[in-house]
Amino acid sequence: MSRRLGLAFAFALASSQAFAHAHLKTASPADGATVAPPSEIILGFTEELEVKLSSIAVKSAGGETVSTAPAEAVPGDRKALKVLLKTVPPGAYTVEWAATSVDTHRVTGQYRFTVRP
């Protein structure tokens, strides 16, 4: 019985480590939102991040990058990143992100939002 218990414990531990990635939890502007022109994008994740190994790029429908600098930490929140934007005209935008958690697992994703006229 102790061998089964040991195997169950090992499996549970491996499973919990598999879910230790930094997944996107919040986004401002939100996925699918239609908003006034934002000056920044802020993304919140489920795990603490290695900021220097994480990124956010914001692109117009034509593929032009409208973010002005590399992503940076949000002061006081080790689970959030932000990036400043150029003045953005109305249209559709894609946010492409890569998050590396402090345990060095990297997760990527993207979402879209629209700037209203």
Image (cartoon, rainbow, N blue to C red):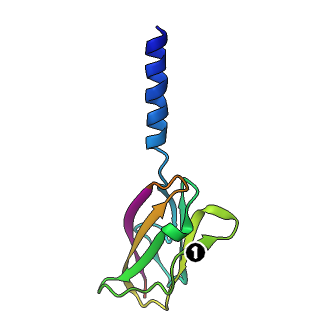
The mark tally for this picture is 1
Give the quarter of the image for residue 39: bottom right
Residue sitting at the far top: 1
Nearest the viewer among 14 and 84 is 14
Q: Amino acid at mark 1?
A: Glu
Q: Quadrant of the C terminus?
A: bottom left
Give the vertical position of 86 relative to 110 (above or below).
below
Residue sitting at the far right: 76
Q: Which residue is mark 1?
A: 72
Residue for point 47% across, 71% down? 55
Residue sitting at the far left: 62
Give the vertical position of 61 relative to 17 (above or below).
below
Where's residue 20, x and y in %?
Answer: 49, 46
In the image, which residues are magenta? 106-115
Give the vertical position of 34 relative to 107 (above or below).
below
Nearest the viewer among 51 and 63 is 51
| Left or right: residue 72 compared with residue 34 | right
Residue for point 63% across, 61% down? 78
Per the picture, the main secondary structure of the magenta-coloured stretch is: strand
| Left or right: residue 91 compared with residue 13 | left
